[in-house]
Amino acid sequence: MKSFPKLALAAVLATGTAGVALVAPAVAKEKPKTAEAGLQLSPAVIKVAKPAQDAVQANNPAVAEPAVAAVEAVATTEGDKYVAAVLRYQLESQKARASQAANPRAVVDESLQARPLDVLIANPNTPANVRGAYAARRGEISYNARQYPQAIQYFTQARTLGFTDGNLDLMIVKAKVDGGDIAGGSADLERVVAAASTGGAKAPVEYYRYAIGRSNKAHLVPQTVSWMNRYLAAYPTNGQTWYEVLATYGFSQDATARLDNPQKIDLFRLMRAAGGLQDQYFYIEYAQKAQNAGLPLEAQAVLREGLANGKIPAGNSEAKAMQVELTRSIAAEGSLASLETKAAAAANGQLAGQTADAYLSQGTWAKAAGLYRTALTKGGVDADTINTRLGIALARSGDKAGALAAFALVKGNPRADIATFWTTWLNASGTAPAA
């Protein structure tokens, strides 16, 4: 029945009826009390309200229904209407709970609770300290009915009235997002996250996951990537966080971006550096892509790491077959020194970039960085790819400032996104990852 946790209104309801004299007056012709002294109740309501209250408190709907209806029928003053609404809301809440208990999977009609809540929100006799809680509950009913604009109106009114339930701001976010205003909901959630991230505290991971999931589902790529980087910055040392974010961005069925294999390799490199390779599928996929790209030493290192930490089971036949093939490929590789000489004399930077890729895959960071710079100087290469990998080489060598400068030069997406993820990691870690 609920999409949000039930609001704790038991105390509110108790407060709502506290001090209401639902007993016959000592003198039958006594005038109604003034607003200053208490509720203005008509004699007709005073006569029937006490039996109705007793039936409601006894949780006896069969007796309470006609008794509450009798109160509603004779209610004339604002005080009468207040008492009638409190009793009706209590009764309808009891009936809804009973219905749900009888059939937990059934959809419970909450609309009958809306009418008395509307009266209570507007009634001048409703105590100021509970009016906001009534508005919040009314917003919850509207939300569950998918009446999102109304839900936002009531939730906002509850906040204005001073209601301070910790979930209220999130309810407004969710109502906006589910109502189609993803940008507005995201902006509100940014404020919630900022408020929750003060004094060394962190916003819960669920906040970030919700924002990423809904933005990604709506194909709002810049907004999704922005939330991903916030999540990574908040939880930079948690490998699971990197796994979730980078898998969602580039490897899942509904991935944020469609990456080619070279781009996936650079994303795998970050996942590995940040401790985000969490299962054998990603280890083997990474190794296969590196092998297919002509980077056997990197593929071998990835497989060995996965086997050593137990992510790849020792008996994995696919990993064994790849190791045999990679051993052959590595044995057949020649020296890169001659390629360096040719790259320096080449008319463009393509050979320098290819040679740099080989050095990068081997972990020879300084040579890789130098050749990437040569490639950029000579031209004829994709600058975004070269700057991404120059940034990776510099990051791995410990040159944080140089790496950040290289990543900042990457402009076209999806490589610019990949560069921002590397930047977030580098800013959060402050050191180069282990080779």
Image: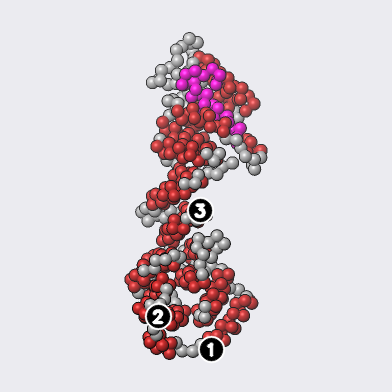
Q: Mark 2 or mark 3, which has the lower sequence index?
A: 3
Distance of label 1 from label 3 (alpha carbons): 48 Å
Instruction: State the SS at label 2.
Output: loop
Numbered circle sitting on residue 332: 1
Residue 89 at x, y percent in the picture: 54, 30
| Horizontal side of residue 73 vs 407, given as left or right | right
Q: Is residue 284 above or below residue 79?
A: below
**Residue at the image point whose x is 59% and y is 41% from the top:** 1
The mark closer to the camera, 1 or 3, is: 3
| Circle 2 crowding by C-alpha within 10 Å: few under 14, some 14–19, many from 20 | many
**Magenta highlight: main SS:** helix
Which contiguous range is marked in magenta? 71-97
Which residue, as the protein is rendered here, is positioned at the far left? 401
**Residue at the image point whose x is 46% and y is 21% from the top:** 78
Residue, disc 3: 218
**Residue at the image point whose x is 48% and y is 70% from the top:** 263
Q: Mark 1 or mark 2, which has the lower sequence index?
A: 1
The mark closer to the camera, 1 or 2, is: 2
Q: Is residue 81 magenta?
A: yes
Relative to the observer, which residue lies in front, 188 or 94?
188
Q: Is residue 77 above or below residue 238?
A: above
